Image: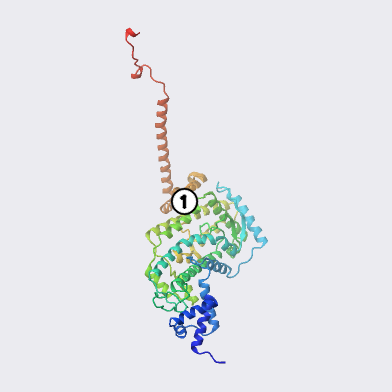
Amino acid sequence: MTEPTSGDGARERWEMILRQVLGEEGAREAMSALEASGFDPAQMAGAANLPTDPAAIQAMMMQMQRMMASGGDASVNWQVAHDLARQVAHTGGDPSVTHEHARRVTSALSVADLWLDAATDMPAAATPRSAWSRAQWVEATMPTWKRVTGPVLDSVAETLTTMLAEGGITPDMGAMGLPELPQMPGMPGGAGLPGMPGLNPATMLRQFASMVFGMQVGQAAGTLAREAFGTSDPGLPLVEEPATALVWANVAEFAEGLDASESEVLHMLAVREVAHVRLYAHVPWLRAHILGLVEEYARGIDLDLQAMEEAIREIDPSDPEALRRAMSGGVFQASTTPEQKAALERLETALALVEGWVEHVSAQAVAPHLTHAIPLREMLRRRRAAGGSAEQVFATLVGLHLRPRRAREAATLWATLEAEGGWELRDSLWAHPDLLPDGDDLDVPKEFSARRRATAQGEADLDAALAEILGGADRASDAPPDEGTGEQDRTVQPPEDER
């Protein structure tokens, strides 16, 4: 049997690649079109540095197919995000929730509702109570991650697409671990192979960016799944469908090594979870308000195009370590505009107000029942102040700091309002977003309280003045006419001869 020449081997390698992408018939047509255009498969294989080992070719094509599959034209490959989030959440184990664990969690959540009745008039939320695994947390929260990160990444992807369409980027396919595509006569650079109109650098780069975005979101969501206690840990309402739940494995890990018993820790976290759920259930506009601030940030995104182009040119997806470095370095991170900074400040203030309210009412609810209530509160404060790896990933990804940085000041403000006017005054500020304190108010809660009282007094005085004016007018209109005076009392007498 005659050994194939180098040219025959190159042709076979190209056919193998094309069959993976186009199928048998499509591969033959593409090869015929290439040869008819004067291209030498051997030279193309050498220029593209194609491997000679069939197994290596197969691995390369699997990499290409993974990159191009399931993403479609979406800015983020959500399938990659979902799968990676599940994998990261399972890293180190994801114990199944036993019947006993579920019983303990649901019991603690029920008790938490009773304790919380002594700290707020907000009614208990009619939601199911559950104990979740980390995987269940990922499934329940992934729709919200789409809403939180999607607008920002859509803006980045739109800019990337514009740059590609205008020729601002000429991707290095070799650096992407893929064969360089030939320049076809009469066609723009990188337009693609004959018979393969979808296989061009611009398409591949968009899909590669979609995959990278998906990996970034998945990494962050999966990491947070290993840290989150419930449905609203960073202050964000993370579940689309209302639910009250605790991630048992994370609660148990947090309790290890603490002076407080596991039961105390469980009840403390249960009260906090129930407080979050009550607040979002009682204030129906709050969830849309917070997520709307994220979308406002996304609308003002302004990219550093030069930095973005340089980052794209340096990406090497064939090197996993390089890909991780790119992700941690925020290669697609946007520069922050003044408008975005303002939106971020409002977002962080809103998150702080939520967390501060939850901290304040939870501390009141558990004080009579838990021996270590004060140390546990301080432990949770330190944990919040330190932040987590998930927060760092999201900050790098889209510049969003999901940590309520000023929750301690917000808790002080809520306590000040309660001391002034009780639960009713404290919780009345949730009636409308315009009533909530802003970032400056957190610095001086007593001044906010005094200013609020002055405003309320001014409105009351104005109402009283208007009532007096309107009341006087009503009294004048209801009074009988004065018969002794006025033009209306003069009657015209007819002449005597007509009497």
Query: Where residue 229 appears, x then y in whole percent?
Result: 57, 60
Q: Colour mode? A: rainbow
Between residue 253 and residue 477, name the one nearer to us: 477
Query: Where residue 147 appears, x then y in whole percent?
Result: 50, 59
Query: Where residue 468 appears, x then y in whole percent?
Result: 41, 32
Label 1's element? helix
Q: Amino acid at mark 1?
A: Leu
- Asked if residue 156 lies left or right of residue 90, the reply is left
Is 494 placed above or below 312 here? Answer: above
Residue at x-position 57% and y-position 92%: 1
Q: Residues within 10 Å of mark 1 (few under 14, many from 20)?
A: many
Residue 440 shows up from this direction: yes
Between residue 53 and residue 460, name the one nearer to us: 53
Between residue 404 and residue 333, name the one nearer to us: 333
Is 315 placed above or below 417 here? Answer: below
Residue tagged 1: 413
Q: Quadrant of the C terminus?
A: top left
Residue at x-position 59% and y-position 59%: 246
Q: Picture quarter containing residue 175?
A: bottom left
Residue 353 shows up from this direction: no
Residue farthest toward the bottom in the current orientation of the protein: 1
Q: Picture quarter containing residue 329?
A: bottom left
